[in-house]
Amino acid sequence: MRGKRRVLTHNRMMPLKFCRPCSRYTLKENCPGCGGATTNPKPPKFAPEDKYADYRRKMKDGERKAGGMV
Ligand SMILES: [Zn+2]
């Protein structure tokens, strides 16, 4: 089965933020641990053509098939 499955795990309503110094995730714009400003773990850039996601998915499929060309 080679259907196009979309994997949207991080693109939700909740804007999950990340604090680098603490290495922790939070929903707040300021880290509850150190009070510093948190950042998005992933850049909020979503290209209309998601080349890289597709590419990575193919690579992952390739790994599952023991790296062989099918
Ligand atoms: Zn912090």
Image (cartoon, grey):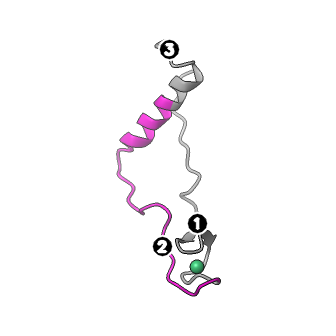
Q: Is mark 1 within 8 Å of ligand 1?
A: no
Q: Residues within 10 Å of mark 1 (few under 14, many from 20)?
A: few
At label 2, which amino acid type do we have?
Thr
> Residue visible at 57% across and 19% down?
65
For the question of whether residue 5 can be seen, the reply is: yes
Residue 59 vs 14, above or below: the answer is above
Numbered mark located on residue 68 in the image: 3
43 displayed left or right of 23:
left
Task: Tell me residue 14's x, y (percent).
Answer: 60, 68
Magenta region, residue range: 33-59
Q: Nearer the viewer, residue 30 or 44?
A: 30
Q: Are marks 3 and 1 in contact (CB under 8 Å)?
A: no
Q: CA distance from mark 2 to mark 3?
A: 39 Å
Q: Nearer the viewer, residue 41 or 2?
A: 41
Q: Nearer the viewer, residue 67 or 52?
A: 67
Q: Mark 2 — residue?
A: 39
Question: Can residue 51 be found in the magenta stretch?
Answer: yes
> Residue visible at 51% across and 77% down?
38
For the question of whether residue 15 can be seen, the reply is: no
Q: Is mark 3 within 8 Å of ligand 1?
A: no
Q: Quadrant of residue 17?
A: bottom right
At label 1, which amino acid type do we have?
Met
Numbered mark located on residue 13 in the image: 1
